[in-house]
Amino acid sequence: MTQQLMQPPLRETASQTAGPYVHIGLAPKQAGFDIFENNFGSVLVDDKTKGERIRIEGRVFDGIGTIVKDVLIEIWQANAAGRYAHPADRQGGKAIDKHFRGWGRACSDFDSGVYSFDTIKPGSVVGRNGRPMAPHINFWIVARGINLGLNTRMYFSDEEKANAADPVINLIEWEARRATLIAQREDRKKGPPVYRFDIRLQGEGETVFFDI
Amino acid sequence: MTPTVPLGRAPQPDAEFMMRDTTSHPSALAPAYKTSVLRSPRLALISLQQSLSEVTAPVFDARELGALDNDLILNAAKDGMPIGERIVVHGYVHDQIGRPVKNALVEVWQCNASGRYRHKKDQYIGALDPNFGGCGRMLTDDNGYYAYRTIRPGPYPWRNRVNDWRPAHIHYAISGDGWVQRLITQMYFEGDPLIADCPILQSVPSEEQVRGLIALQDRSHFVQLDSRAYRFDIVLRGHRATLFENRVQAQGALK
């Protein structure tokens, strides 16, 4: 700690855009070739993962409403019990799920622009000062033209009561903007419920992004 | 075993990270980099005090990676070696206090020696190299150290202003110990004359921060009669000191 008081901290390395070819490094199959034996992807669950299976689908729009088709999104979330698979999460009474890391990566489809994740609905995590946070999923968005990765959160439309009490949603002074963080649930005849989460980078309905 | 604390307590204050100094980074809107014009938020970011959602991050295991994942010279070679200058790139990932970031996932991607990316959307006339893929990944060791070998990428023209050329660069994505540390950047090469004209680099707000993106030739790590070496260190967000503010907060959380 003494060292911290004596010297100013170093500067964080400058961010740069992920560029149009981010898929080569982070999702080579989407770039059009197969190189790694094990690929990181958009399916966060296996057969034994605990919790309600859900699918997240959405698109990303630019400032004039054009679909951004070269975006890469990563998500990070707690498990069904509301615990993150990380040593800094020491919440008692919530078990780690060995079958759930809570992290995934997806690219928008080059033609339709749709991205998707197959995951579970997270439980509530304790926030600062003991206030529970509504179930949510952390999003990180990078693409050509985005100079610093954008952070946001996705909340669930069927958690109205928890959302109304959520300390982060309530930080957003402009109530109309809060809706940009709520994914709408659609129950389909086949398969898990789908939460639709569109992201608007700029302009009307601009998604709330966070400086974390 | 990590000790648990009762439900209702805030995350350990010592797990929090320093706030991001936005003057270290390009602005979202950098008009000379034309694509940023419609892809940059116009409204202010909402600042969050960190919770467990921000101070945690995925943990990776070396068993998830393959033996050649950090060898771009061999990991896509089919019937020979890729063409171009053989180089080793190495360095340390540390935080703003200088502490190593252990087990960080470092992912890299690049074009080949003629400036062509192995990507279905890259239409550049430069030739593809049948023996070069252009991506690799590795985890840092306990000292935050990483190393990989590759072919030095070439510069290439891109659709911005008509004669814009990207200086030779390697893209990096780094995943550290906390979600707030997630970073994407690009590494450039010492002495490249295209660095001065690049609108993407010009979006970086200070010369000092640009220098931080330029790898230096490192003769001490040349591989004899084989490869040159470049050194590139990365600084991620640092953990905060535990000062009075946090103690008060921790007491509040106990109630």
Image (cartoon, coloured by chain):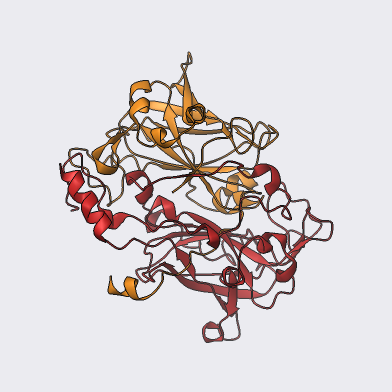
Chain colours: A orange, B red
- The image shows a total of numbered marks equal to 0
The residue sitting at the right extreme is B162
Q: Is residue B16 placed above or below A93 in the rendered structure?
A: below
Quadrant showing the N terminus of chain A: bottom left
Against B199, residue A141 (above or below) is above
Q: Which residue does the image show at 50% across and 63% down from the upper left?
A: B68
Res A99 → quadrant: top left
Residue drawn at the location 32% of the way across and 74% of the way down: A3
In the image, what residue occupies the spot 45% across and 35% down? Answer: A172
Residue nearest the viewer, comparing A62 with B166? A62
**Residue A15 visible in this rendered orientation of the protein:** yes
B159 sits to left or right of A131: right
In front of the other: A125 or B175: A125
| Image quadrant where residue A118 sits | top left
Report x, y in % for residue A11: 48, 67
Residue that sits furthest to the top in the current view = A189
- Left/right placement of residue A189 relative to residue A35 reads left
Task: Reply above or below: B102 against A110.
Answer: below
* A120 or A17, nearer to the observer: A17
Rendered view: A116 above or below B51: above
- Percent position of residue A179, x then y: 49, 27
Examine the rendering and report whether any part of residue B172 can be seen: no
Left/right placement of residue B168 relative to residue B214 reads right
